[in-house]
Image (cartoon, rainbow, N blue to C red):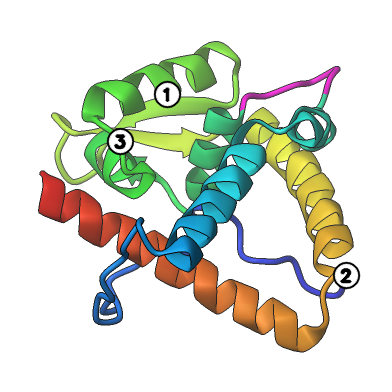
């Protein structure tokens, strides 16, 4: 694979502010709508907790120098630039307290470090450490290898369709979450 795929949390890949397509009513009494919802729900469940996922997670995130998926998510962002705690929480799409726990874990494991903002010493910044950069690079290389293998199962046209549909699905989740909040 010549170029690494955009990493989850990549600034260019994770903003889903584009408009969601006009809603089409789903009628669960309609057998086709019901079957599609069941298939999508099952696929979502399998992606989250399927048997193969544990093997892929172990491969990508390591066994000897293992990190957690949540740590990789934060390292993806910190590898690009230093972040404020607030900015990290926003980009991770989590509560500030959740981001604090994630950073505590990274700092404890020597993968990141806190420092005062050069602009305002009251603001806490976070940066990736040298060990964090090494661990992130190794996991990133394994993730790219897995993505190359997975995407190799699809034609270029199917990959394009899949990317577009997944982006729309995430945008729809954001839209529905906003409506339900």
Q: Secondary structure at mark 2?
A: loop
Which residue is located at x 45 percent, y 52 percent?
81
Q: Give the mark, 1 or 3, whose residue is nearer the N terminus.
A: 3
Q: Which mark is residue 152?
A: 2
Crowd rating for badge 3 (residues with CA inside 10 Å; few <14, some 14–19, many 20+): few
Can you see residue 151?
Answer: yes
Which of labels 1 and 2 is toward the front? 2
Q: CA distance from mark 1 to mark 3?
A: 12 Å
- Which quadrant does the N terminus fall into? bottom right
Q: Give the mark, 3 or 2, whose residue is nearer the N terminus.
A: 3
Residue 129 in percent (x, y) is at 58, 32
- The segment highlighted magenta reads 63-68
Q: Which residue is mark 1?
A: 103
Can you name the residue that lies furthest to the top here? 108
Q: Which residue is mark 3?
A: 94
Can you see residue 10?
Answer: no
Crowd rating for badge 1 (residues with CA inside 10 Å; few <14, some 14–19, many 20+): many
């Amino acid at each position: 694979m010549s170029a690494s795929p955009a990493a989850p949390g990549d600034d260019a890949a994770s903003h889903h502010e584009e408009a969601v397509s006009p809603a089409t009513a789903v009628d669960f009494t309609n057998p086709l709508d019901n079957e599609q919802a069941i298939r999508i729900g099952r696929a979502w469940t399998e992606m989250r907790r399927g048997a193969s996922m544990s093997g892929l997670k172990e491969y990508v995130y390591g066994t000897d120098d293992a990190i957690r998926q949540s740590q990789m998510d934060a390292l993806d962002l910190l590898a690009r630039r230093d972040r404020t705690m607030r900015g990290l929480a926003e980009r991770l799409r989590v509560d500030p307290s959740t981001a604090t726990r994630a950073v505590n874990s990274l700092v404890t494991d020597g993968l990141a470090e806190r420092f005062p903002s050069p602009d305002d010493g009251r603001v806490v910044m976070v940066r990736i450490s040298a060990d964090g950069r090494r661990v992130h690079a190794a996991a990133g290389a394994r993730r790219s290898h897995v993505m190359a293998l997975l995407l190799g199962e699809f034609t270029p046209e199917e990959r394009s369709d899949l990317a577009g549909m997944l982006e729309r699905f995430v945008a729809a989740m954001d839209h529905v979450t906003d409506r339900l909040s």
